[in-house]
Image (tube, rainbow, N blue to C red):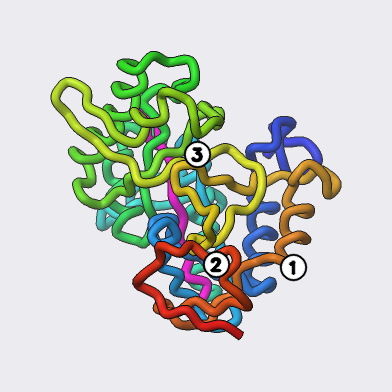
Amino acid sequence: DTLYTGGNVDRDGYHRTAEAFKNDLEMYYQSNYRMIRLDDYIYGNIDVEFGKSPIILTFDDGHINNINILGLDSNQNLIIDPNSAVGILESFKNKYPDFNVTATFFLNSGLFGQPIYNKQILKWLVDNGYDIGNHTKNHANLKDADISKTQSEIAYMYKLFDELIPNKYVHIISLPFGLPGSRSHPNLPYILKGICDGYSYRTNGVLQVGWDAECSPFHKKFDPTFLMRIRAWDNDGINFDMQMVFETLEKTKFISDGNINTIVIPNNDNLNINIKDKKIIKY
């Protein structure tokens, strides 16, 4: 925490202190947000109780403060630092069982930077309701990379996950630096689908760095290949900091009707007309 300024974030606004993160989680819960998995959001599986709103947590880069391992207990189970992100999340899981605590961690080749424990960490996370996603092998700038480099960076991580946690990771990429930041960039097709050294992969979702809350998966503008995120930083209520975004969400957020198979809307002006597996209820 000594690296941080202002008590909440570092100078670039990409990290939270343990204290600020705890306050964030408490705010989410008291504001009637309940967590869902990123994969479920992409596929429109919003399983949230009546009157509550879905929220998704994501972490990039696999910093050691995401899940810091202090050692093993007498049964060879991981001892998780209670002030690391997962330690804090687990405490909230116990405090508020209905919070549905989960998160997706997007990793590079160093995983969580703890070679002795990395494999065990991955298994523990997926066994305890968390998800693992792709952040490229070397945190690569995919805007400037050629097609071969783009495919090798992405394929490496998918292949590594296949070896370590087969069929237990999500086919979602968090773009390093949020690049390329354009739907029309020539590398995007190779981010979504490619092959490297005989290994083929596919991607179902692509995340940007920021800047605002994303729309409902049932909205006509929903695009899983270009998903925005709220950046966890404080900036006096401007430039899409947390205060600005959550104040806006009080008027615009998705509120669940409690039924995963229905969509309740005032009109269908913004409804994705291709949705066929949900019952539409107008009021």
Q: Amino acid at mark 3?
A: Asp
Q: Quadrant of residue 75?
A: bottom left
Foreground residue among 130 and 71: 130
Whole-Å distance between the Cαs marked 3 and 1? Answer: 29 Å
What residue is shown with label 3? 60
Mark 2 near mark 3, Cβ–Cβ under 8 Å?
no
**Mark before the other along the chain sequence, 3 or 1:** 3
Disc 2 marks which amino acid? Pro
Q: Nearer the viewer, mark 2 or mark 1?
A: 1
- Residue 95 position in % (x across, y down): 55, 73
Q: Which residue is mark 1?
A: 251
The residue located at (50%, 39%) in the rendering is: 60
**CB under 8 Å between discs 3 and 1:** no
Under mark 1, the amino acid is Lys
Label 2 crowd bin: few (<14), some (14–19), many (20+), radius 10 Å: many
Please identify the quarter of the rendering in which residue 231 is found: top right
Of the pair 48 and 8, the residue shown nearer to us: 48
Residue 175 appears left or right of 238: left
* Label drawn at residue 54: 2
Q: Residue at x 17, y 29 (%)?
A: 199
Whole-angstrom CA distance, mark 2 to mark 3, is: 20 Å
Nearer the N terminus, badge 2 or badge 1?
2
The N terminus sits in image quarter: top right
Q: Which mark is residue 237?
A: none
The mark total stands at: 3
In magenta segment, residue 101: yes
Is residue 17 at least partly visible in the picture? no
| Residue sitting at x 42%, y 64% | 44
